Image (tube, helix red, strand yellow):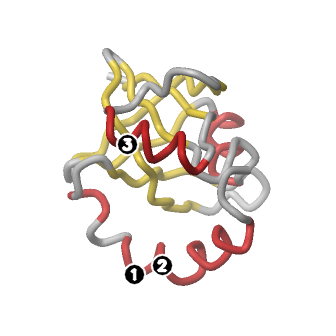
């Protein structure tokens, strides 16, 4: 896991709640809407999301074992709110790379520096 677990817990409880209203409108960011595997509840999680050809790529800054990633994989999809628009997605797939990061240059440099090497690729449903 690139970022410490305690940072993830703090962000989940505090920062994410404050940032959620703004994140869908910020360049390079988005909000994943997913349904809990066990609870069936709807959740929203801020993410770094970029267009990559016909797909979107989401940087997994806390690694691939987070609840939202497992929820999206189990459901086979979810929604991404980006640039103020909700986009349904299907076919989530994990990609691990130690070399090339499939994100814009400066973001790739920052992600490499903090050790992020896992990404989730998703296809728009429509």
Give the structural element (helix, strand or loop) at label 2: helix
Residue name at image x 62 percent, y 79 percent: 10
Q: Tell me the number on the disc at residue 107.
A: 3
Mark 3 is surrounded, within 10 Å at the Cα level, by few (under 14), some (14 to 19) or many (20 or more) other residues, namely some
Q: Is residue 50 above or below residue 67?
A: above
Furthest-right residue in this view: 38
Question: From mark 2 to mark 3, how far is it between C-alphas?
Answer: 20 Å
Question: From mark 1 to mark 3, how far is it between C-alphas?
Answer: 23 Å
- Residue bearing mark 2: 15
Which of the two discs, 1 and 3, labels the residue nearer the N terminus? 1
Instruction: Residue 25 in the image: state x and y as whole percent.
Output: 21, 58
Q: Quadrant of residue 77?
A: top right
Image marks 2 and 1: residues in contact by CB distance under 8 Å: yes
Residue name at image x 71 percent, y 36 percent: 74
Image marks 2 and 3: residues in contact by CB distance under 8 Å: no
How many numbered dots are placed on residues in this image? 3
- Residue bearing mark 1: 18
Which of the two discs, 2 and 3, labels the residue nearer the N terminus? 2
Instruction: Residue 47 in the image: state x and y as whole percent.
Output: 45, 52
Question: From mark 2 to mark 1, how far is it between C-alphas?
Answer: 5 Å
Q: Please tell me which residue lies in front, 59 or 91.
A: 59
Q: Is residue 115 above or below residue 50?
A: below
2 vs 3, front mark = 3
Residue name at image x 45 percent, y 59 percent: 46
């Amino acid at each position: 896991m690139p970022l410490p677990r305690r940072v993830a817990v703090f962000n989940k409880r505090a920062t994410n709640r404050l940032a959620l209203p703004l994140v869908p409108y910020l360049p390079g960011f988005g909000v994943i809407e997913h349904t809990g595997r066990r609870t069936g509840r709807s959740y929203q999680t801020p993410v770094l999301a970029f267009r990559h050809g016909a797909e979107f790529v989401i940087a997994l800054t806390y690694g691939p074992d987070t609840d939202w990633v497992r929820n999206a994989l189990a459901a086979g999809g979810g929604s991404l709110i980006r640039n103020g628009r909700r986009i349904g997605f299907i076919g989530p797939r994990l990609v691990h790379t130690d070399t090339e990061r499939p994100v814009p240059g400066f973001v790739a440099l920052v992600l490499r520096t903090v050790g992020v090497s896992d990404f989730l690729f998703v296809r728009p449903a429509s």
